[in-house]
């Protein structure tokens, strides 16, 4: 038995002063249940994707979901953490429960409140999602980690700063059309490609425009089995899904290639019985622009070192053969860690239902979603299709 998304919700992403973690969770929970058209009493299990790590004082947040509606009381609730892939990890755990027949209706919530701590503390918390003894303990931050990937890629395939700027410019332009996005300004290629006071070098060769912002936000999904989907007004099926986990230390992996993501994409596409060229769109984990470039090649859209051509030829742009991150991606939409994977699936589902508004990819039939934890350590790939 497969699973279908039959209701969803999405908060605005950004600095949401006045909304704490509990408020974010409560609002998307109520909205997703209303969107699905079911009562909270039907929910048989709850999964919350959240990193935390010190962003908020609460280390036991799973039952905060119950605050959204008294009828959720007694439903088993579990928090799931897998770094920046916590949202997809929560979704996949819920899918397992639904597919087993144990839980008829599952609620998945992804949420993060990141802006309550300062910049240095944010950097420290995120850095601890690396292999600490070799990376964070030596002062290596996540911009630094992905800068090493970019340096390795450039050493192997030539200087590609302009390629990274094209990715940033594309995603910022797409973000203008996303009403939930944190950054809704078309910055243009020249701004993204130029180091300036407004666009400083963060960790060479990555500039500020190559890095996703710090964000608050939440998203939620109601899941049921295939057989139950007919009673709902809308349904988007997870046609296939794959998770691959790699070694945590970067020293044990090739920094210039996304081997884990490549395997996850290959497994998910094979299980779905399709190829990458059959996809109508993809929402991928562009925590840094180099991650999106490496993902093009991991997906099989381009040979190693050739991902830049997809931008110059317009393949991955709006109106191209395979639009990538029509939402603006993490780069413009924002990256509230635990919410990200859930958000990607929600936005892809909107596309497949023809309900994505100004972001809509015409005639979208099949969507790929790629959510990643750490430096390509945990890779989750879903292939989604409209079920009704």
Image (cartoon, rainbow, N blue to C red):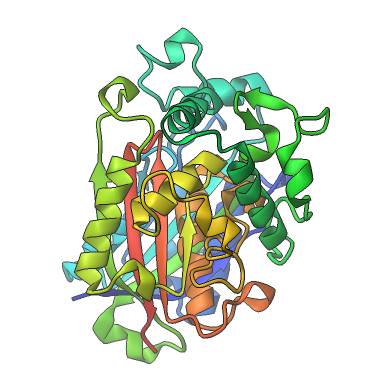
Residue 295 coordinates in the image, percent (x, y): 42, 49
328 or 35: nearer the eye?
328
The answer to whether residue 334 is left or right of residue 381 is right
Q: Which quarter of the figure has residue 336?
A: top right
Residue 209 coordinates in the image, percent (x, y): 68, 39
5 or 355: nearer the eye?
355
Please report the residue visible at 51 percent of the width from the left and 11 percent of the height from the top.
Answer: 139
The answer to whether residue 378 is left or right of residue 169 is left
Inspect this view and state whether residue 77 appears.
no
Residue 5 coordinates in the image, percent (x, y): 40, 74
Residue at the top extreme, as displayed: 138
Inspect this view and state whether residue 20 appears.
yes
Residue 351 coordinates in the image, percent (x, y): 53, 76
Please report the residue visible at 36 percent of the width from the left and 75 percent of the height from the top.
Answer: 278
Please report the residue visible at 51 percent of the width from the left and 51 percent of the height from the top.
Answer: 339
65 or 374: nearer the eye?
374
The quadrant of the image that shows the C terminus is: bottom left
293 vs 37: above or below: above
The quadrant of the image that shows the N terminus is: bottom left
The answer to whether residue 213 is left or right of residue 95 is right
Q: Which quarter of the figure has residue 280?
A: bottom left
The answer to whether residue 192 is left or right of residue 338 is right
Q: Which quarter of the figure has residue 203?
A: top right
């Amino acid at each position: 038995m497969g699973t279908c998304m039959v209701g969803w919700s999405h908060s605005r992403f950004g600095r949401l002063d006045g909304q704490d973690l509990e408020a974010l969770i409560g609002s998307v929970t109520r909205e997703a249940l209303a969107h699905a058209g079911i009562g909270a009493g039907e929910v048989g299990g709850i999964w919350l994707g959240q990193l935390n790590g010190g962003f908020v004082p609460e280390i036991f947040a799973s039952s905060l979901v119950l605050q959204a509606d008294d009828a959720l009381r007694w439903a088993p609730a579990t928090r799931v953490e897998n770094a920046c892939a916590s949202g997809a990890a929560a979704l996949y755990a819920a899918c397992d429960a639904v597919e087993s027949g144990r839980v008829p209706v599952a609620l998945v919530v992804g949420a993060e409140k990141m802006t309550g701590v300062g910049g240095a503390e944010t950097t420290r918390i995120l850095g601890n999602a690396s292999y600490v003894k070799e990376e964070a303990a030596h002062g290596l931050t996540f911009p630094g980690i992905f800068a090493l990937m970019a340096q390795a890629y450039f050493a192997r395939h030539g200087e590609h700063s302009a390629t990274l700027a094209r990715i940033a410019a594309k995603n910022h332009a797409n973000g203008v059309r996303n009403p939930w996005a944190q950054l809704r300004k078309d910055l243009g290629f020249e701004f993204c490609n130029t180091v300036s006071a407004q666009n400083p070098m963060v960790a060479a060769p990555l500039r500020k425009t190559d890095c996703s912002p710090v964000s608050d936000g939440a998203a939620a999904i109601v899941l049921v089995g295939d057989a139950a989907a007919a009673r709902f007004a809308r349904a988007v099926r997870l046609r296939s899904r794959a998770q691959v986990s790699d070694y945590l230390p970067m020293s044990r992996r090739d920094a210039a290639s996304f081997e884990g993501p490549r395997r996850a994409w290959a497994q998910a596409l094979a299980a779905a019985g399709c190829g990458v060229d059959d996809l109508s769109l993809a929402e991928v984990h562009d925590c840094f622009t180099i991650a999106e470039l490496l993902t093009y090649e991991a997906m099989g859209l381009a040979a190693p070192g050739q991902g830049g051509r997809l931008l110059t030829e317009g393949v991955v742009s709006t109106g191209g053969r395979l639009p990538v991150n029509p939402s603006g991606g993490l780069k413009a939409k924002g990256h509230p860690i635990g919410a990200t994977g859930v958000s990607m699936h929600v936005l892809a589902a909107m596309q497949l239902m023809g309900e994505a508004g100004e972001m809509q990819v015409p005639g979208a039939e099949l969507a790929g979603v790629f959510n990643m934890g750490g430096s390509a350590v945990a890779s989750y790939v879903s292939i989604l299709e409209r079920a009704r």
